[in-house]
Image (cartoon, rainbow, N blue to C red):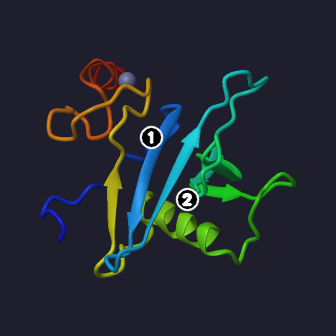
Amino acid sequence: MHDVWEYRPDPGHLQAGRFVFTVDNGRGRRLTFRIARPRRAVRDILFASVRTDTADAWPWAYVGVYEPADGTVRLTGGSRFAATDLEVRVLAFALRVIHGRQALPAGYALLPSARCACCGTRVATRTATVAGFAPACSQRLTQAA
Ligand SMILES: [Zn+2]
């Protein structure tokens, strides 16, 4: 059951700092990904992670470095996954969809997060001016554009 409205985030929004989205395969399987800027980074860098179903205190498993220039994720030494793992392959194709290089396969859907991609505030998708952002943050984004 999917809404007629199809969520397609602006590729630029992936650099907001706390961008989270979910890929739904339409058959009951979902993977949630996060593109985030670490708080104490010496340079501007974005880490891609996937939400795990384990009861760990920290639910995000590190995948790799997100490269905004080409919309890919580069696996690094600290990656918890191999290039052939499902999580890595799903993230790669979802990023190609977001960057307009590939169509989403039939039955699949991208779902926005319930929290603002900038500040982490809980947002209602229907009231957010830009999907996935709290009103104050989406106003800032609109002004910056
Ligand atoms: Zn915000």
Farthest residue in the right direction?
77
Crowd rating for badge 1 (residues with CA inside 10 Å; few <14, some 14–19, many 20+): few
- Tag 2: amino acid: Asp
Q: Residue at point 45% right, 68% down?
A: 101
Secondary structure beneath label 1: helix
Q: Earlier in the sequence, mark 2 or mark 1?
A: 1
Label for residue 120? Answer: none
Look at discs 2 and 1 and give the one toward the viewer. 2
Identity, as a three-letter code, of the amino acid under mark 1:
Gly
Relative to 64, say whether 44 is above or below.
above
Identified at 58% across, 46% down, the residue is 68
Q: Report the image quarter containing ligand 1.
A: top left
Element type at mark 2: loop
Residue lying at 32% horizontally and 32% vertically, measured from the top left:
133
- Picture coordinates of residue 141, whole percent (x, y): 34, 25
Of residue 90 and residue 60, the one placed in the foreground of this image is 60
Quadrant in which the N terminus is drawn: bottom left
**Residue that carries the numbered disc 1 in the rendered image:** 12
